[in-house]
Amino acid sequence: MAFNLSSRMFVVGLAGGSASGKSTFSNALVTLLNTADPSLRVELISTDSYFLPNDRIPTFFSPTQARAMPDYNRPDSLDMAEFFRDMDQRCTSPQAPDVLIVEGLMVLHLPEIRERCDLRLFVELDADQRALRRMLRNLDTHNDPIGGINTADCIANYFLESAKVGHDRYVEPSRKYADFILRGDGDFIRTSKMVAGLIRSWEACKTRGSPAVN
């Protein structure tokens, strides 16, 4: 890992499985950075905001539902053109953030994203814990994006037929690109302080014009 001091913006890429704790950690990191240094402009982008519309989303055939189902667990489910338009606008804007945190399933799998990251993080959590978290989360979701999957057996089947398949194929192998692996059941208060310390070191180096830190 090297700090690119020629860049105006420090980009943190955060990947991990569904319900591993990516969003929770990202929000904890944003809160900590904003609290520690209110002058530091921090923004968070989730690739979940860039899923293709329903008529363009890839599908798979679900044996348990006996129908085609939207598949949100593969790289081509994302509108990458829109994502990079938004990211480039942030980079070139006079109000560009000092720190941009990009979180999502495929952040480290897709070279177009990970190569823009100054710091790459992966949140790991055992599959059974992620499945349970998804169950509890989705049972409490009233606006289910998948469509009609709000019962325990349907949530479990979708996890096995789509989420787990995508995780094993794309997400888990991408951990090899991470600079640091974080436990999804760990102490996010402690680990977010460690990551925030690295980011603030970059900001301090950039301000002083010091050589990049390797």
Image: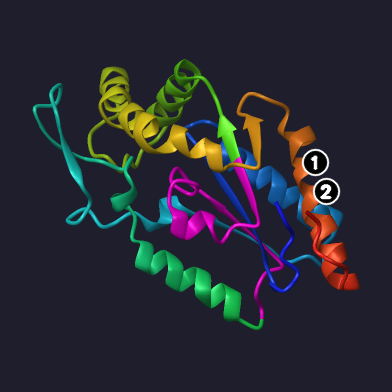
| Residue of label 1 | 194
Please tell me whether residue 17 belongs to the stretch shown in magenta: no
Q: Which residues are magenta?
A: 95-121
Helix, strand or loop at label 1? It is: helix
Residue 122 locus on image (x, y percent): 58, 38
Residue 107 locus on image (x, y percent): 48, 49
Residue name at image x 38 percent, y 68 percent? 82
Residue 139 locus on image (x, y percent): 38, 27
| Residue of label 2 | 197
Residue name at image x 79 percent, y 50 percent? 198
Residue name at image x 75 percent, y 45 percent? 195
Side of 40 where 109 appears, left or right: left
Q: Crowdedness of circle 2 by 10 Å Cα count: few (<14), some, many (20+)?
A: few
Side of 30 where 15 appears, left or right: left
Answer yes or no: do the residues labelled 1 and 2 have beta carbons within 8 Å? yes
Helix, strand or loop at label 2? It is: helix
Measured Cα–Cα span from mark 1 to mark 2 = 5 Å
Residue name at image x 26 percent, y 31 percent? 149
Q: Is residue 91 visible?
A: yes
Q: How many marks?
A: 2
Residue 63 locus on image (x, y percent): 13, 23
Comparing 83 with 67, the one in front is 83
